[in-house]
């Protein structure tokens, strides 16, 4: 019988992420692993944008499992990783972090425009993905 107390419940999707204890052979039971997700991604002309959403005030631990995965993704060619904090359905972004480029989240809560100014980050990515330019869309020119 599985140990439901060690599973993580996803309240929106109404399902449990499995505990690896339920899946792995007994010698690995001392390991505590959970599944993680990435909230969205887009592809254009073989170039990818991965987006992770966090509620305002939630810290992304770049040294934790999900943070390490996002950092490694950001090192791949033709891949960009963006973390946004805010209420996305309402188009309100209070901060963003371009993984691999911004050491800390960039506060954009006072910026004007759609998505409080973070929209430019998406525009930069799209224009780069739509072109044949080398490099990375967020590199300093």
Image (tube, rainbow, N blue to C red):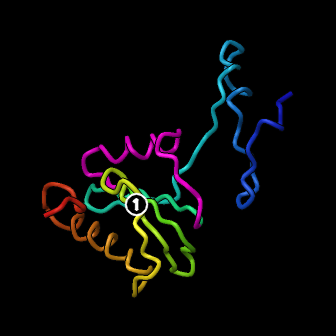
Q: Which residue lies furthest to the right in this view?
A: 1
Which of the two residues, 13 or 141, is positioned nearer the viewer here?
Answer: 141
Mark 1 neighbour class, 10 Å CA radius: few under 14, some 14 to 19, many 20 or more: many
Query: In the picture shown, does residue 104 fall above or below 76?
Result: below
Q: Position of residue 28 (x, y in %)?
A: 65, 17
Q: What residue is shown at x 25% (from left), y 46% (from top)?
A: 77
Which of the two residues, 56 or 81, is positioned nearer the viewer here?
Answer: 56
Q: What stretch is highlighted in magenta?
A: 56-80
Tell me the quarter of the image containing the N terminus.
top right
Q: What residue is shown at x 34% (from left), y 48% (from top)?
A: 74
Query: In the picture shown, does residue 131 fall above or below 20?
Result: below
Q: Quadrant of residue 129?
A: bottom left
Instruction: Count all numbered tags in the image, as a single digit.
Output: 1
Q: What residue is shown at x 36% (from left), y 59% (from top)?
A: 98
Which of the two residues, 65 or 36, is positioned nearer the viewer here?
Answer: 65
Query: In the picture shown, does residue 50 fall above or below 22?
Result: below
**Disc 1 target residue:** 97
Q: Quadrant of residue 137?
A: bottom left
Secondary element at tag 1 = strand
Q: In this view, does 32 lie to the left or right of 129?
A: right
Give yes or no for residue 61 being in the magenta stretch: yes
Q: Position of residue 25 (x, y in %)?
A: 68, 16
Q: Residue furthest bottom?
A: 112
């Amino acid at each position: 019988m599985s140990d439901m107390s060690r599973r993580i419940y996803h309240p929106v999707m109404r399902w449990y992420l499995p505990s690896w204890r339920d899946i792995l052979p007994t010698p690995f039971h001392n390991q505590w692993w959970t599944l993680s997700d990435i909230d969205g991604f887009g592809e254009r002309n073989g170039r990818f944008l991965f987006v992770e959403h966090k509620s305002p005030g939630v810290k992304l631990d770049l040294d934790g499992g999900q943070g390490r995965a996002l950092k490694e993704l950001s090192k791949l060619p033709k891949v960009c990783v963006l973390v946004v904090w805010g209420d996305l359905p309402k188009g309100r972004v209070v901060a963003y972090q371009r993984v691999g480029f911004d050491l800390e989240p960039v506060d954009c809560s006072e910026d004007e425009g759609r998505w409080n100014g973070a929209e430019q980050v998406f525009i930069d990515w799209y224009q780069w993905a739509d072109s044949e330019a080398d490099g990375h869309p967020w590199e300093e020119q």
